[in-house]
Image (tube, coloured by chain):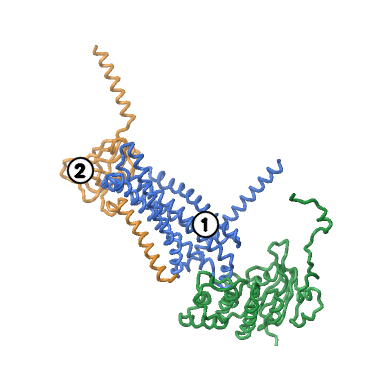
Chain colours: A orange, B blue, C green
């Protein structure tokens, strides 16, 4: 085979192959968002993070504004310490609250931010004061049973 | 009867030691390839020629298979997802299945049977017809000139072929899901983009295909170089290449998946 | 005038399996400028001897000196350097099937030298002219007949004018015309390029016609040596059986087996 023909074909092959990779990265994956955006870090403590994982989205008003970057256990307060990377273009007030929510009924968990009213904005390294932990099914059930039992006892007493 | 059992055990033992010996030789061969790879890169034309024979000529089977696998995923996936009212997640199903698993694995298996067996046969025949010996007599190192370019050609081609397989598979799933069945086009792509992570899914898929490329090409060149210089020897070697490569791909896939997609992610 | 021999083999022994040696204490000398034949039956060890000279196999005993170097003391770089001065013609040519005839002959020039393409082209044409095959320069080896392939391989082997040429059974399977051509080429190339050649063969006619000296090998030992004329007149039983092509003699016709009566009387095994 002539050298030039081989070179052309190999060049085409490599170009098409890289094209495939690019297609995967851009159209199929989420490269377009976030990997090169600037972020600032904010922390929050939760009594229970449930199934929250690193790289879980941080949403506010349903829009993804950041990602969870780290989850550790604070041995002094015995709570979970979660670090967020928030996209630099979004500023939140200092009294913003963070809740751990579930997308759909059985979906994966994410962090929802509700903006507060404070004039001063969060900066790098700040800690969110108001947090609400994930809903744990067992606690919910035992609470429900407890309530039911209390109700039954009240009505018995009331009689 | 006891003598027969003892003989069987002895055969098993010697067979196992023979295989271990061969594995050791194969490992040394691998190191030799790496050490003698200078020529393959300094005279890159040699490697380019091999990329043509290994990669370009495999494109047709990869593209066609990818398309069909994607289309089947679309059909079967929708069938099952629809039962849980999650038909819109078809894009996610097709994309993740292909990028994480089916792309690297099936492309690897196809590459092993098409290009791997061709490489084994070629090197084996060169050895049988004394071309390798002639090269050595002319003071040209056959590992540098014949083996290393083929090895690197395989390693370079595999990730590209796997990416093409996945890309075409997703397109096939799109054709079947959106165009044929009627899944919402916007939901198809947006859910896919939301769930497929470049670093964790796509990059891991690329790493897998690189590992498979190394394994398959290593086995192919080794079996060719080690083949007995007869017709039966070469044909046995090509069969062994396909079988051993396929098993290696599946075993490595398990190991890599366990490392990448389960333990690593659960923080 | 005592010029050093090109090849000097001193009591060399070798066995692929140490328990069954193929060569027992073989000694021979190859004088510069001569064409020497190493002859014997199939399987007598002559190809093994050639391989030891080329540095492929390491003798288990004895000394092998080629072009002034002791072969067993060389490392792989040393052996490669030694092989640059040698050329070998393999039994069936062993041309590279994925290249043209031209590229085959040009192979060594391109691998080992930095000669410009024009010079390489001219040299290839010269070598092909010497073997009479300039006309097939652009053909692929698969398109050539056996005799032509072997001549191309010869052109390839002498591409860099080696000092020592090794020929492994160059006459096997050729028609009479090609036989004559190859034999003449071996002699003329040897003389015109100032080479020394070793021809391993069992073709008495062709070999005796071109060699200066012959060593006869049988069962791993040198059993006779001399010029072709001396050997033709030799009374040595093995030599005369070989030279005259007699079916029976020191090399028996019958392979060792039980007596004929015993085999006929024995019951059939695969009834």
State which chain disc 2 sits on: A
From the viewer's perspective, is C41 left or right of B64?
right
Residue C84 in view (yes/no): no
From the viewer's perspective, is C5 left or right of B246?
right
> In front: A104, or C58?
A104
- Disc 2 packing (10 Å; few <14; some 14–19; many ≥20): many
* Residue B243 position in % (x across, y down): 52, 52
* Residue B110 position in % (x across, y down): 45, 54
Q: Mark 2–mark 1 contact, CB under 8 Å?
A: no
Residue B219 disc label? 1
Element at label 2: loop
Return the residue found at the far top. Answer: A159
Return the residue found at the far bottom. Answer: C1
- Disc 1 packing (10 Å; few <14; some 14–19; many ≥20): many
Q: Quadrant of residue C80?
A: bottom right
> In front: C146, or B98?
C146
Return the residue found at the far front. Answer: C271
From the viewer's perspective, is B260 left or right of B244?
left
Q: Residue at x 38, y 46 (%)?
A: B72
* Residue C197 position in % (x across, y down): 65, 79
Residue B190 in view (yes/no): yes
Q: In this view, does C100 lie above or below A88?
A: below
Query: Disc 2 to disc 1, how far (Cα)?
Result: 60 Å
Residue A94 disc label? 2
State which chain disc 1 sits on: B
């Amino acid at each position: 085979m002539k050298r030039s023909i081989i070179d052309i074909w190999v060049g085409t092959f490599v170009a098409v192959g890289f094209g495939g990779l690019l297609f995967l990265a851009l159209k199929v994956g989420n490269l377009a968002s976030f990997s090169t955006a600037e972020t600032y870090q904010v922390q929050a403590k939760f009594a229970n993070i449930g199934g929250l994982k690193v790289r879980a989205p941080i949403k506010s008003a349903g829009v993804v504004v950041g990602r969870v970057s780290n989850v550790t256990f604070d041995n002094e307060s015995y709570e979970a310490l979660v670090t967020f990377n928030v996209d630099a273009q979004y500023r939140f007030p200092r009294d913003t609250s963070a809740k751990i929510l579930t997308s759909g009924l059985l979906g994966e968990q994410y962090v929802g931010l509700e903006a507060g009213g404070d004039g001063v904005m969060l900066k790098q390294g700040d800690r969110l004061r108001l947090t609400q932990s994930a809903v744990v099914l067992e606690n919910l059930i035992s609470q429900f049973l407890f309530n039911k039992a209390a109700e039954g006892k009240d009505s018995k007493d009331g009689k | 009867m006891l003598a027969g059992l003892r003989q069987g055990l002895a055969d098993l033992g010697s067979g196992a030691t023979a295989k271990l010996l061969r594995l050791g030789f194969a490992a040394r061969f691998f190191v030799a390839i790496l050490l003698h790879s200078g020529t393959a890169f300094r005279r890159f034309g040699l490697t380019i020629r091999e990329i043509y024979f290994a990669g370009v000529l495999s494109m047709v089977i990869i593209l066609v298979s990818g398309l069909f696998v994607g289309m089947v995923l679309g059909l079967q996936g929708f069938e099952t997802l629809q039962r849980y009212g999650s038909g819109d997640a078809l894009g996610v199903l097709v994309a993740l299945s292909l990028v994480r698993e089916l792309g690297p694995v099936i492309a690897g298996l196809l590459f092993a049977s098409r290009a791997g067996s061709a490489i084994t046969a070629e090197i084996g025949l060169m050895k049988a017809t004394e071309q390798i010996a002639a090269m050595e007599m002319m003071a040209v190192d056959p590992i540098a000139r014949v083996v290393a370019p083929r090895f690197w050609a395989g390693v370079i081609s595999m990730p590209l072929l796997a990416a093409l397989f996945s890309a075409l598979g997703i397109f096939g799933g799109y054709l079947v899901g959106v165009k044929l069945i009627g899944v919402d086009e916007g939901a198809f792509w947006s859910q896919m983009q939301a769930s497929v992570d470049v670093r964790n899914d796509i990059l891991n898929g690329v790493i897998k295909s690189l590992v498979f490329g190394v394994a398959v090409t290593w086995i192919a060149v080794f079996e060719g170089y080690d083949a007995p210089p007869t017709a039966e020897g070469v044909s046995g070697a090509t069969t062994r290449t396909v079988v051993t490569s396929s098993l290696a791909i599946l075993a490595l896939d398990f190991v890599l998946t366990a490392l990448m997609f389960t333990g690593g992610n659960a923080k | 005038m005592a010029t050093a021999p090109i090849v000097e083999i001193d009591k060399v022994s070798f066995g692929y399996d140490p328990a069954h040696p193929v060569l027992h204490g073989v000694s021979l000398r190859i004088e510069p400028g001569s064409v020497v034949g190493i002859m014997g039956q199939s399987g007598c060890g002559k190809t093994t001897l050639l391989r030891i000279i080329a540095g492929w196999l390491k003798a288990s005993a004895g000394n092998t000196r080629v072009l002034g170097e002791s072969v067993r003391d060389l490392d792989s770089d040393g052996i490669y350097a030694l092989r640059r001065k040698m050329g070998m013609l393999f039994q069936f040519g062993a041309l590279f099937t994925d290249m043209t005839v031209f590229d085959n002959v040009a192979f060594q020039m391109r691998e080992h030298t930095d000669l410009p393409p024009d010079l390489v082209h001219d040299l290839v044409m010269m070598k092909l002219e010497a073997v009479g095959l300039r006309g097939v320069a652009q053909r692929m080896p698969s398109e050539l007949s056996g005799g032509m392939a072997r001549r191309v391989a010869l052109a390839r082997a002498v591409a860099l004018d080696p000092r020592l040429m090794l020929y492994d059974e160059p006459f096997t399977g050729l028609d009479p015309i090609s036989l004559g051509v190859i034999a003449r080429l071996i002699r003329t190339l040897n003389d015109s390029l100032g080479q020394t050649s070793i021809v391993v063969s069992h073709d008495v006619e062709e070999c005796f016609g071109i060699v200066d000296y012959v060593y006869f090998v049988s069962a791993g030992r040198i059993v006779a040596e001399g010029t072709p004329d001396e050997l033709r007149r030799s009374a040595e039983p093995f030599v005369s059986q070989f030279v005259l092509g007699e079916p029976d003699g020191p090399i028996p016709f019958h392979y060792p087996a039980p007596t004929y009566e015993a085999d006929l009387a024995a019951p059939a095994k695969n009834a």
